[in-house]
Amino acid sequence: MKKVEAIIRKSKFDEVKKALHEIEVNFFSYWDVTGVGNEKQGHVYRGISYSTTDIQRRYLVIVVSDEFLERTVNAIFDSASTGNVGDGKIFISEIVETYRIRTRESGNPAIN
């Protein structure tokens, strides 16, 4: 099992959620987060300078079986990418074990 953590643009969240549902990844958690990016300059809109160093993003955590890893990552790539700086990051880590509290199932059955 793998844990997929993705930091994406808030504006792309609905597209990412739809893409994940289409590949049958129907359970994940998410949070609104603020991060600091590489871009050091601000933007000017109607004569007012706005800082872009603090970036509003959405942080997703998805636990999938090894068989779903590649399609999950590809779904995020395809739906979250704008081709511009600031599209986000994806992190993958190993999950040692998973339990479903209600039934006490463990392993892959607990995440499906």
Image (cartoon, rainbow, N blue to C red):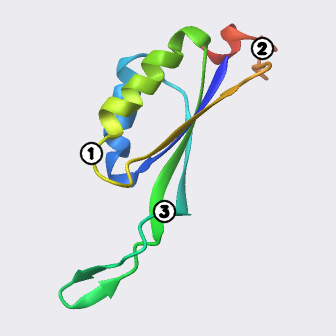
The three-letter amino acid code for the residue at tag 2 is Thr
- Within 10 Å of the Cα at label 1, are there few (<14), some (14-19), or many (20+) other Cα atoms? few
| Secondary structure under the numbered disc 2 in the rendered image | loop
Crowding around mark 3 (Cα neighbors within 10 Å: few <14, some 14 to 19, many 20+) is few
Q: Does 66 appear above or below 15?
A: above
How far apart are the two marked residues, 2 and 1, measured between alpha carbons? 41 Å
Q: Give the residue type at disc 3.
A: Gly
Given this view, does label 3 or label 2 mark the residue nearer the observer? 3
Rendered position, 107 above or below 30: above
Q: Are marks 3 and 2 in contact (CB under 8 Å)?
A: no
Q: Secondary structure at mark 1?
A: loop
**4 to the left or right of 8:** right
Which comes sooner in the sequence, label 3 or label 2? Answer: 3
Residue carrying label 3? 37
Mark 2, residue position: 103
At 65% across and 22% down in the image, what residue appears? 2
- The kind of secondary structure element at disc 3 is loop
Q: Residue at x 70, y 14 (%)?
A: 110
Instruction: Determine whether label 2 and label 1 are within 8 Å by CB.
Output: no
The first of marks 2 and 1 along the sequence is 1
